[in-house]
Image (spheres, grey):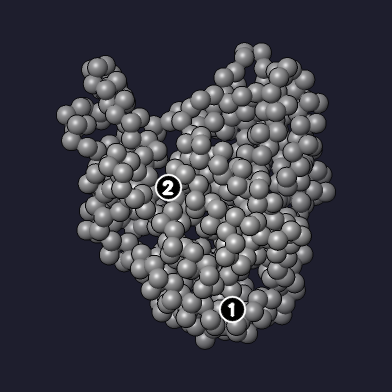
Amino acid sequence: MIQSEDKRALVQVAHNPIVAFTTLGCPKNEVDTDLMRVAAEAAGYYTREFNSENTTSYDAIVVNTCSFIQEATEASIEAIFDTLALGDVPVVVAGCIVNRYADDLSQEMPEVKAFIKVGDCEALVRILADCLPLKSATPVVRDSLPPRSFEYLRIADGCDRKCSFCTIPSIRGSYTSREPEDILAQAHSLVAAGTRELIVIAQDIGRYGSDLAMPATTATATTSTPLIDLLEQLAAIPHLKRLRLMYLQPEGLTDELLQTMAKHPTIVPYLEIPVQHVAARILKAMGRNPRDVEGFEARLVKARKLMPSLSVRTTLIAGFPGESHQESAQLRNFVERIGFDYVGVFPYSPEEGTRAAKLPDQLDEACRLERAQELRDFADSIGWQRAANRIGDTAEVLIEGYDPVDDVLIGRSSFQTPDIDGIVRVELPDEFKHVNFSSEVEAAADAEDFARKQDILAKYYNRYLRVQFTDAILYDMDAAIVSDSDKDGSEHL
């Protein structure tokens, strides 16, 4: 990669301890981890991203867990045991699994130094002070490595929905919006530091501000909801190139939101809308409103007319209690009609403490897995074809890395969210091609060429290039450079 392995590395004094962080689960957990790192650094501790191949320099490890479904819980437990196996390094377990299973975990894992709940940064600092007394006398300042190309901008946390299958309200509490002034200040700071894309996240961004006592800010007097007002102000931040919206419930796909997205080139034409199911009986059993999904298709047709390049991701649950073969087929037909770009399919997981786990007519695990796999395969066949249809198109790609094995730049277009929607593999410019770089050893044989190539690669990191897609491999795209968008001043979407 172009950056060093730890993008958030710190200038460290030798005697000061290092706290390593590893994160499981969704982007909301990434935000929680960053808040914990900031708190640790403010208290005088140096922090790193955890690397399983380089553990000798860590003085403590924080595992930020996910426990949304059983599979995530098992992955978190495995990660905890992996860190405990490292030996005498204190391990702190944080996040969702603690909120759900704190008492059980303390009995099953007495080796863990402490368990802290979601967002409890103060508890983390107290624990570090207990087990790592040596620290910097002043807050630690991260060094001046290049900024990340994207950052998550959380505008709210928690959820008030009563979905019968979901553990999130019990883990993260009720829906709580951040004050718009705080969000805007953070956004301006991130963009000023060099971030090229902000990803707006919440459990349901459409509900943003519904719990705030104050009215929407008055910077854009014509808007009618706190979310629209916030988006108008975020989209106007100088030098911000992409603003991406994540986790919008179906009823949040309003005319006003669509018009706002279409009006601002900064807001990328991309939506993540978790539908979960389409059969009215199943939706009612899920605690969701069938009418919201009934109107979804018509709203999506309107959205695609306003934004012809719109990409849409959804999540679906297969094998919910009582789901008939007909209702399973109904879900498949829905996927075919809509033509989603991306579909995340989850086999229903009967989670402890949820109402759905107590429903009659629970399907056996083999049936749930089979239905999920069949639906996933079908959805992928549509998504792969939609990706292949892009061959020959041109688009703006944000360069985020370099693959020395295949000798290509790695980037993302507006239709790709980090880590889940694939990548764009960009052919190197002509100026690279005479340099032998099949391995670092071979490249080192010509130190001048090696240094030159590294300089050129660094030049492209966090830049927008206009490319033409030449091939598609599943969801990944191959592309050739057409122009340097940052250099020619064109739009970056």
Residue 308 shows in this picture? yes
- The mark nearer the N terminus, 1 or 2, is 2
- Residue 155 position, x and y percent, is 63, 53
Q: Is residue 338 above or below residue 203?
A: below
Please give the residue where the numbered disc 1 appears in the rendered image. 292
Q: Which mark is residue 307?
A: none
Q: Is residue 116 above or below residue 447?
A: below
At a point 35% along the width and 68% down the height, the residue shown is: 308
**Would you identify the image quadrant in which residue 34 lies?**
top right
Q: Which mark is residue 241?
A: 2
- Residue 110 position, x and y percent, is 79, 38
- Residue 324 position, x and y percent, is 57, 84
Type of the residue with mark 2: Lys
Q: What element does badge 2 sit on? A: loop
At a point 69% along the width and 76% down the height, the residue shown is: 287
**Would you identify the image quadrant in which residue 459 lies?**
top left
Mark 2, Cα crowd under 10 Å, few <14 / some 14-19 / many 20+, is: many
Residue 53 shows in this picture? no
Position of 475 compared to 82: left or right?
A: left
Spatial CA distance of label 1 from label 2 is: 32 Å
Q: Nearer the viewer, mark 1 or mark 2?
A: 2
At a point 35% along the width and 30% down the height, the residue shown is: 458
Q: Nearer the viewer, residue 257 or 53?
A: 257
Residues tagged 1 and 2 counted as in contact (Cβ below 8 A): no
At a point 81% along the width and 26% down the height, the residue shown is: 130
Type of the residue with mark 1: Asp
